[in-house]
Image (cartoon, rainbow, N blue to C red):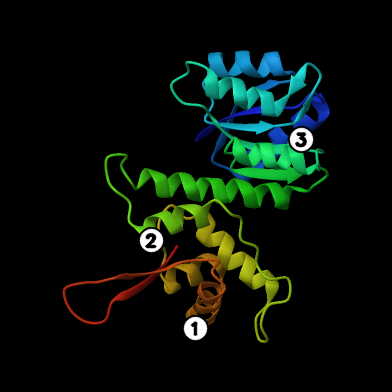
Amino acid sequence: MIRTLVVDDDFRVSRIHTSYLARAGGFEVVGQAASMAGALEAVRQQRPELLLLDVYLPDGSGLEVLRRLTESSISRRPDAIMITAARDVASVRSAMALGVVGYLVKPFGFAALAERLTAYQTLRRRLDLLPPEVEADQSDVDALFSAARPHRVPEVPAKGHSAPTLARIRDALRAARADLSAAEVAELTGVSRATAQRYLSYLVREGLIQLELRYGSAGRPEHRYR
């Protein structure tokens, strides 16, 4: 579970974001804060790993929260997804300079936040697979930067593919704790193995999932999808 702090001066919005995190799965809300001072204190007390952070706060800015945490003595600054009505380029540039992992403009629905949360979970999993003392090669670096970006299923998929089926297969892979075979995806989604294989191949071509080959002692490698 990723320990998460929700920072927004509107308690109704904060409550909605909290419910979205519960729906997404894999996140534990360890607190809510309605001000810059409250956010800084909550970070010190609760040690969250992720902030859902508004820019506009009654006593300052969410961006200033990140600046102060960066300059503070805490062992590790939490990652942050900005969730805000701030659309000005200056705020976006500042957020990028401060290393935020996502920027979502209000208003939005659950699906938009879920995509960014899933991308963040993927990034965390990839980082966990690379111990700090290991030197990453270019493919590792590319995979990390790619994982931080949400990937949408095309609204108009290629001929012969159904958007709901694509989404169902992608969601099954997202929910899995490990890579899956076409047969396992078929069982989870209720489609035939051949249909699962066809959709999985399409999602690989679109860059939405990854194909990994598992080699055994003999014979052809097994195709696994993540």
In this view, the mark in front (3 or 1): 3
Vertical side of 94 occupied by 77: above or below: above
Q: Which residue in the protein does label 2 denote?
A: 139
Asked if residue 50 lies left or right of residue 19, the reply is: left
Disc 3 is placed on an element classified as helix
Residue at x-position 68% and y-position 22%: 32
Q: Which residue in the protein does label 3 denote?
A: 16
Q: Are marks 3 and 2 in contact (CB under 8 Å)?
A: no
Return the disc, 3 or 2, that comes first in the chain's sequence. 3
Residue at x-position 47% and y-position 15%: 73
Return the disc, 2 or 1, that comes first in the chain's sequence. 2
Disc marking residue 72? none
Q: CA distance from mark 3 to mark 2?
A: 38 Å
The quadrant in which residue 89 appears is top right
- Quadrant in the picture for the C terminus: bottom left
Q: CA distance from mark 2 to mark 1?
A: 30 Å
Give amino acid for label 2: Ser
Q: Residues within 10 Å of mark 2 (few under 14, many from 20)?
A: few
The quadrant in which residue 169 appears is bottom right
Decide which of 24, 9 is in the foreground and name it: 9
Q: Which residue in the protein does label 1 denote?
A: 194
Disc 2 is placed on an element classified as helix
Give amino acid for label 3: Ile
Q: Residues within 10 Å of mark 1 (few under 14, many from 20)?
A: few
Residue at x-position 82% and y-position 38%: 85
Vertical side of 26 occupied by 226: above or below: below
